[in-house]
Image (cartoon, rainbow, N blue to C red):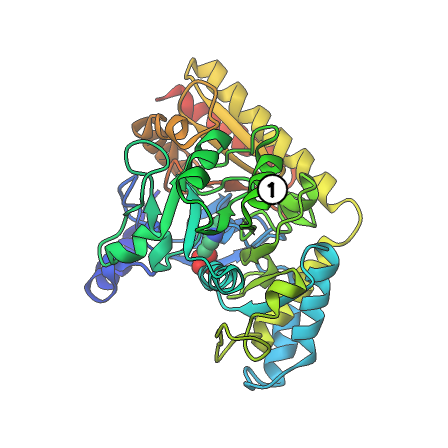
Amino acid sequence: MRFDNSEQLFARARRLIPGGVNSPVRSFGAVGGTPPFIVSSSGAHVRDADGNEYLDFVGSWGPLILGHAHSAVVEAVQRAAADGTSFGAPTERELELAELITRAMPSIEMLRLVNSGTEAAMSAIRIARAYTGRSKLLKFNGNYHGHADGLLVKAGSGAATYGIPTSAGVPLGYAAETLVAEYNDLASVEAVFDANVNQVAAVIVEPVAGNMGVVAPAEGFLTGLRKLCDDNGALLIFDEVITGFRVAYGGAQERYRIRPDLTCLGKIIGGGLPVGAYGGRAEVMQMVAPLGPAYQAGTLSGNPLATAAGIACLQELSKPGVYETLEALGAQAEAGLRAAGGAAGVPVTVERVGSALTVFFTAPPVTTWVEAASADTGQYTAFFHGLLERGVYVAPSQFEAAFVSLAHTTEDIAFAAEQAREAMASL
Ligand SMILES: *Cc1c(COP(=O)(O)O)cnc(C)c1O
């Protein structure tokens, strides 16, 4: 496989754009080599600037659950564009998207559309603070909620410590408002509450972790969080930017039957265009300006093209049988990866919820960040390049999800499993 054109483009890009990319993981920093520059796509496949074609399991990092360039989405965007790309005034499409979302997730009584998952999480937290009159936030080690200052924090040594910023440029004062507990460890959450009585505004959690690789919630974890929040007067925020319309039409809150106070959405609800949303109990959302005192705004929020794409995407997903198909394709991929590891004698753990999955290069179990972080990233790197050379495109990092879409066929998954078997055999 040749990458001459991508190499030239990457060299040009690196002179103007930090790392040559507009989001760090795209740079292949964790796995090395040149990221293919993508020129076109359709269904489950993408093509690069050198004419190489790949079976894609990145799916733009989650949004493309229908596959690439789905005709319903493309046509909806084209129709909307012909009527104008932005008005800065209300439109019926915003309302339609809001209705689709609130019908899918009954915990969301009111919502705001924004432009990214980062904005959704940042705004939901502001509203939770305004509503509770408290300032501290509890998040989980290994969970990601976008790049707002106070969220770029992971645990220091030991649970229940004050957050240490993971990024330069984050004031220590912001980070100190962020408390960190261990995912799937209720005792660590209780310890944080006990050490910060009446100070925690909200707990924010990825109900299925997706940004440390896929890690499912342990039995009782989400129910326990709901109870701890209620007992301590804190709001429960589900960051469903990945899981919303992915692990069920109504997200993780439907799959695990938990009612959060606030929910953050993004990715799928934009159908591949930039959209986010946050919403929840009406009483809480009434804090948002102009109804209430918490300010939040956006020039392009509720954008006509983005809402058209989002509506088209959710309408496709509301058709019967969609999530059964995704579950079956996901299960086939999981079985294929397990078998590939077994055949090669390589210890792997495959974690999957619906059509999102991760193969960790470590023996089971993977239920916490510490266990996920024990994966052999060197083996993942070799596996990644083995797949890329064989025409299968997965995330260039161990700690990301692979996404199966409705455009993947059982033949596609069988092909990917065969390539995985060969790639693992040559580790
Ligand atoms: C992707 C992601 C975000 C951030 O969304 P952006 O649109 O990239 O800003 C937030 N939370 C979770 C769980 C995500 O996966």
- Tell which of 57 and 311 is nearer to you: 311
* Quarter the N terminus occupies: top left
Which residue is drawn at the image coordinates 73% and 46% (left, top)?
322
Residue 211 in picture, x, y percent from top left:
44, 43
Q: Amino acid at mark 1?
A: Arg
SS at mark 1 in the image: helix
Q: Quadrant of residue 282?
A: bottom right
CA neighbours of label 1 inside 10 A, class few (<14), some (14 to 19), many (20+): many
Q: Which residue of the protein is positioned furthest toward the left in this rendering?
A: 15
Counting every numbered tag in the picture gives 1
Could you say where residue 427 lies in the image, as x and y percent from the top left? 35, 22
Residue 393 vs residue 364, the one in the foreground: 364
At which x and y percent is residue 377? 32, 30
Q: Is residue 61 visible?
A: no
Reply above or below: 182 against 304. Answer: above
Which residue is denoted by mark 1 in the rendering?
226
